[in-house]
Amino acid sequence: MTPVRLRAILTARRPTAALAAFLVFLPLSHIQVTIAVTPPADERILPITCNRDCGGGCPLLAVVRHGRLAAVRDNPLAGPHIRGCVRGYQLARVIEAPDRLVKPLLRVGPRGSGAFREISWSEALERVADGLMRVHARHGAAAIMPLGGSGSCRGALHNTESLPLRFLALLGGYTGTYGSYSSGAASYTTPFVLGDAPSGIDAATLQYSRLILLGGANVEDCRLGCELGSRVRQARDRGVPVIVIDPRRTRTVSRLGTEWIPVRPGTDAALMLGVLHVLVTEGLIDRPFIARMSVGFDRLECHVLGQDGTPPKTPTWAAAICGVPADTIINLARRYAAARPTALIPGLSIQRTIGGEEAIRLAIALQVATGNIGIRGGSSGGLVWSRLPDPQVGTLPVPANPAGLGVPVYQWADAILGGRAGGFPSDIHAVYNVGGNYVVQGADTTKSARAFHTLEFAVCHDLFLTPTARHCDVVLPVAASPERADIVLTGANMLLYSHRAVEPPPGVMTDYEVFCALAARLGLEPAFSQGRTADDWLATFVEASEIRDVETFQRTGIYWGRDRLRVGLADFVADPQAHPLSTPSGRIEVASDALRRGGFSPVPTARCLLPEPEQPLYLVTPKSRYRVHSQHSNIPWFREREEQALWIHPDTAATRGIADGDLVLVRNARGRVRVPARVTPDIMPDVVCLLEGVWPEVMPDGTDVAGSANMLTDTTPTLPSASSRTHSVLVQVETVATPVSR
């Protein structure tokens, strides 16, 4: 473990408190200068994490005064490159928000109306038990669908995905969901190409890169781990080119990048095919590396050159589709070939499109072609974050689903509305939702709300009365991350211990405690808890881990894995014979016959959504810096720091008579949203941007006036992965009013 230097401690935001904290919980071997500092008697400083679905997994410190969360700071022991963000630093605003739920609620009006009354825990648990058993008796276990996951997705125990699955499996089963809103296309496709080999990189390996390409990766706002942004900045500061390929000039472009290449949404595959054409025709590919490490590149080469009956994928061909000038594509390809190692880091956005599967396949193919896989400073071309194993630790066991049924998570609303008659495996009559705001975050908000209206029973756990909670029959208030202890898996080579820094509001339970109480009413408690308290489970997890110094882990909040410079596929690249992949060939399959047998092209192609006369503009719906998806949308401090407006290029605005600040209508076949226009050159022409996560405010005519992006998205998935395509959206935009004040 790296010693903590006094300089690092003294640069903390509250140096006296930070120094006092670390003198309390650091082993003496890690303190190079000893200064006697006594923290105030009313102050405690404890390691915590956010444990939310943001991509961070950040080691933090809670400053607790008089039993309240007074501040959240970075944990200095994590080192200079691991930092939290504004969302974590402001946790106190979340847990102390005036609209925080502290009593169970029972719906007394129509679904979605917000009409509830407070009830006792005893009544709430009885109603949930009765509702579940009533549906179970009438329709069978498969009539219940669990939703959730984003409330607490990294905890070994307090995990809003595994807890309901464990409970419902013991109840008899359920119709589950599979895939991922975040990374469904990549997670589906990558095994066809790389098998099951870990394919990520530790962020620290970027210190060896000579070029970094960020393809739709806004690592400043949409965090791919808590270290990556800092490591990219470090590389840029030492002179490494950082090229950001994105439809808009993000904070990553302005703060970390050295160059911005605007590209139309969902056309990254065309751009990469154009780059490959230059690499092949100019003799810039590494043929010995390709021959040793892969199969099928010759078939992709035929496609790129147009020898398969398709047009050659020249830079001019690509430019017409992706909007990147041909000269820029040529220059990018030559620079890419000249710099080795190059880290090509795709963001989640490029695979959240129609044909997103192809974008990931082509990114891997590019890294194969240039010999950048399996070496420090390079990358696999696939997703880099959370694609290497966490250190070994126990987690809450989840039994197999006795019903054995599942639907793509992107189509959960279609499954509820369509049922067996619509080709889905079951008819859904109840939803148990833990920590998810699916009415807002599912594609096509109107359809999502309609799906909830068809249910016989719905229950949710949450901190707030979200739009999804408003569509449930019973709403159970639960503890937030600083109000419970847990071990947190980060997706990096470290484990975090998150203390129960403050108590939850009186009467509020953790999700685990709720399920224990509910299981007791249904006769399942011995099987569910196995007689263990939350602390007992955490002790069991540590016993099953590689951690040997438990006291230090709890005191410092961090356990480091042994190697923090890991590169996925390094063993394979070093010796493909000794360490073959689990693909049919044992090598990287640039062309996949398994995909061909499923009815899709064996080589990656460009499957791009093109504008239509009635919907001529591309819409992207990226994350906000101030929200974790829809979390914080209800909290004024976060909402006031970022205007919810439609980004639109001056040329696109001018053709529609739109001025900056005008109220505009964004519409398509699924919905209508009225928001102010932000006319800016920070987005490319014919593309508009509306940040996702805002809770909708729908008028009687069906128009949303809050700026909720999923009013406009579509549940038709990208195939074959049946995954999200929320960046493949077409809209029309028109002015509807005179300018509004900004």
Image (spheres, grey):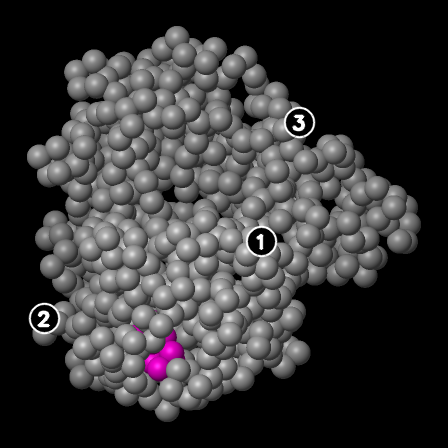
Q: Is residue 184 above or below residue 324?
A: above
Q: Secondary structure at mark 3?
A: helix
Dot 3 surroundings within 10 Å: few (below 14), some, or many (20 or more)?
some
Query: On the picture, is 298 further left or further right than 67?
Result: left
Magenta-colored span: 268-277
Q: Is residue 273 above or below residue 353?
A: below
Instruction: Name which residue lies at 17% across and 36% down.
Output: 424
Q: Nearer the viewer, residue 676 or 402?
A: 402
Quadrant of residue 708 in the image?
bottom left
Question: Alpha carbon of mark 3 to alpha carbon of mark 1: how far?
Answer: 33 Å
Q: Position of residue 685 (x, y in %)?
A: 27, 80
Q: Nearer the viewer, mark 3 or mark 2?
A: 3
Q: Are marks 3 and 2 in contact (CB under 8 Å)?
A: no
| Residue linked to disc 2 | 614
| Residue linked to disc 1 | 578
Query: On the picture, is 284 further left or further right than 314?
Result: right
| Residue linked to disc 3 | 543
Whether residue 614 is in magenta: the answer is: no
Instruction: Name which residue lies at 26% across and 15% down.
Output: 133
Give the dominant element type of the magenta stretch: helix, strand or loop. Answer: helix
Q: Would you say residue 461 is visible in this rendering?
A: yes
